Amino acid sequence: MDSKLAAVAEGVSDMADAKPTAQRFHHYVFFLLPFAALFELGMLSGGYLMLGDPGWASAKGLTVILVWFGANAVLVDLIHKIWKTRFVFTVSSSGFVVTDPVQRTERVVPWGAVTAVEKIEKYWWNRGGGICLNRITLQDGHEVLFGTHLSNYSRFLEGLARNAVACEHFGAYRRGIGERASEEVPR
């Protein structure tokens, strides 16, 4: 966050001065994504080898292939969620900056531009666990996604709930991955 970025932001005049007190929140994307992609490569090559086996059409072979497809669907969903939540959030008293490290873009969002924070429901086959996603809807119609694997998730939600004054609906997932029930954010 430099003075040039602050000058671009509409209505966010003190973003450049907020650097010492700004908090950064990031997803654990670049640690998880290579391992998930490598595991997916192993899953795909394993599927190729299974279909090359002459016994794949037996009851046992069909069961193994069915379990493989289920595990592969969960893994592809995980990789998709990790990729969609690659943003870094820098939060200050006047708003937050959403940085995309892959596309190298930044978007300054004043707190008054947040109209809704809501959870994205999980797929029917993955209701039990995994990474949950939330959506921040802005006044201009843009959406910013963040997941429960965000660093200091409860603190980020607390700041969002406290500062987003124009927010009409706040229904995010209450607890991040690895957080205890005592760390939930009331709203």
Image (cartoon, rainbow, N blue to C red):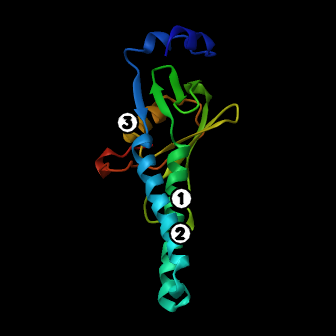
Marks 3, 1: nearer the viewer: 1
Does label 3 or label 2 sit earlier along the sequence?
A: 2
Under mark 1, the amino acid is: Val
Compared with residue 106, is residue 25 higher up or lower down, i.e. above or below?
below
Q: List x then y, in percent, for residue 145.
A: 56, 42
The answer for how far apart the CA atoms under marks 2 and 1 are is: 13 Å
Q: Is residue 140 above or below residue 66?
A: above
Q: Residue at horizontal 56%, vertical 63%?
A: 123
Q: Which numbered marker is on residue 155?
A: 3
Q: Residue lying at the far right in this picture: please name it.
A: 140
Task: Judge by depth and name the residue closer to the eye, 132 or 99.
Answer: 99
Q: Are marks 2 and 1 in contact (CB under 8 Å)?
A: no
Q: Position of residue 148 (x, y in %)?
A: 43, 47
User: How crowded is the residue under tag 3: few (<14 C-alpha within 10 Å), some, or many (20+)?
Assistant: some
Badge 3 or badge 1: first in the primary sequence: 1
Q: Between marks 3 and 2, how big is the CA–CA gap?
A: 30 Å
* Residue under label 1: 76
Count of picture labels: 3
Rendered image quadrant of residue 48: bottom right
Amino acid beneath label 2: Trp
**139 shown above or below 172:** above
Q: Are the two marked residues, 3 and 2, in contact with CB atoms closer than 8 angstroms?
A: no
- Residue 46 place in picture, x, y as percent: 48, 69
Q: Between label 3 and label 2, give the one nearer the viewer.
A: 2
Q: Are marks 3 and 1 in contact (CB under 8 Å)?
A: no
Instruction: Out of 104 and 25, give the one closest to the viewer.
Output: 104
The disc label shown at residue 125, or none: 2
